[in-house]
Image: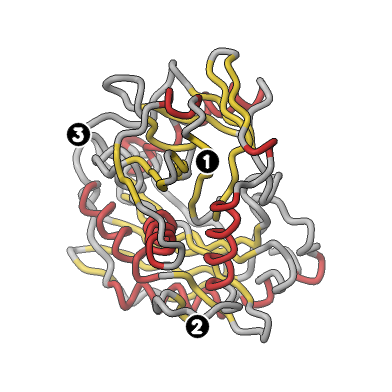
Amino acid sequence: MVDPSDIDFYSLGFNFIETKTMFMANHRDGKWDGGRLIPYGDFEISPASCVLNYGQGIFEGMKALKTKNGEITLFRPEENAKRFNFSARRMLMPEYDVNNFLNAVKSVVKANEDYIPPYDSEGALYIRPILFGYGPILGVHSSEEFKFIIFTVPVGPYFPEGFKGIDLEISKEYTRAAPGGTGSAKTICNYAGTMLPAKQAKARGFAQIIYLDAVHMEFIEEVGAANFFAMINGKLATPRKTGTILEGITRESILELASKKLGLEIEERDISYKELFNESCTEVFCSGTAAVITPIASVNLEGNERVFNNRAPGKITNKIYELLTGIQRLDLEDEFGWMTKV
């Protein structure tokens, strides 16, 4: 455990820092136990565990924030609980009661309150619920034992650039998910395959990859682990939900803010990468729990580069960022009922 007094909350990256307490629940004989808070630490696992051999595991990403008056907030946590269960069903694992999920998250946040970065920092307490096949098996089938764990980590911006433009590379070599697969589930299987492409892109000077669809290698899917948005012909466009992209909670919130607060016309559709190189595309950004809203300064495909807004965040990107973060910090009225106080 790292002592909170030893942490510089104003210079955090998106890296692991051990906190004090975690939550653990076990599923055996077809039912969950009550779960409990325990000190953060290691536990034993069989080499034949299902998650180690066949990747039966899912996770969520959430954040706890401090407001100006010291309150602790969670952003739409019930949506994380619902998505967690959606992923569990897809990976043939037991669901976890939504109310119990929310109570467990709150209890872990309260237990690690000293690790929440202050209001005037760019940081948050990242919350990681995980569920995995714990029991030993041989042969491709579901585990009979499962563990549900929630741990927390104080973090800074996901991209070191913060709310500044990042440079992205469009990949014509790698894809993230295919139709009929697990692209819309937040399973661990979806992330290991993106490590090599991301490492190669970063070695070439890019922050991440824009993945295209696996069928045509033309339509934009995701930015690494973030959803994609573009202003095209004055409309806010984002890839439609086809089962191959993660159905982001921040994504849904942005669409609602853009429509109801900014009066923008929304398009959920196939977006060809070619559109990014046309003048009709005026600004682009990506979003997620970790990324929040991150402006995209440029996109590059095989040496052809398109720079947006002289690398500065666009007007719409700025407005949506201010609205979203203002609501999350309770600096703006939460008229949508999105925030939960801990």
Q: Could you tell me residue 65's position as x and y percent?
A: 59, 72
Give the Cα distance between marks 2 and 1: 32 Å
Q: Amino acid at mark 3?
A: Gly
Q: Quick one: 127 or 144, which is closer to the camera?
A: 127
Q: Are the two marked residues, 3 and 2, in contact with CB atoms closer than 8 angstroms?
A: no
Q: Amino acid at mark 2?
A: Lys
Q: State how many labels appear.
A: 3
Q: Secondary structure at mark 3?
A: loop
Judged left or right of residue 136, residue 211 is right
Label 3: how many Cα within 10 Å (few below 14, some 14–19, many 20+): few
Q: Secondary structure at mark 2?
A: strand
Residue 180 tag number: 3
Residue beneath the point at 76% across and 64% down? 9
Judged left or right of residue 14, residue 55 is left
Q: Secondary structure at mark 1?
A: strand
Q: Amino acid at mark 1?
A: Val
Residue receiving disc 2: 341
User: Does 170 sit above or below residue 22?
Assistant: above
Judged left or right of residue 75, residue 85 is left
The disc, 2 or 1, on the residue closer to the chain's N-terminal end is 1
Residue receiving disc 1: 284
Q: Quick one: 172 or 263, which is closer to the camera?
A: 263
Q: Could you tell me residue 323's position as x and y percent?
A: 54, 66
Judged left or right of residue 119, residue 45 is left
Q: Are the two marked residues, 3 and 1, in contact with CB atoms closer than 8 angstroms?
A: no
Residue beneath the point at 55% across and 13% down? 302
The disc, 3 or 1, on the residue closer to the chain's N-terminal end is 3
Give the Cα distance between marks 3 and 1: 28 Å
Residue beneath the point at 38% across and 57% down? 255
Residue 130 visible in the snapshot: no
Q: Could you tell me residue 63's position as x and y percent?
A: 53, 65
Q: Could you tell me residue 217's position as x and y percent?
A: 35, 20
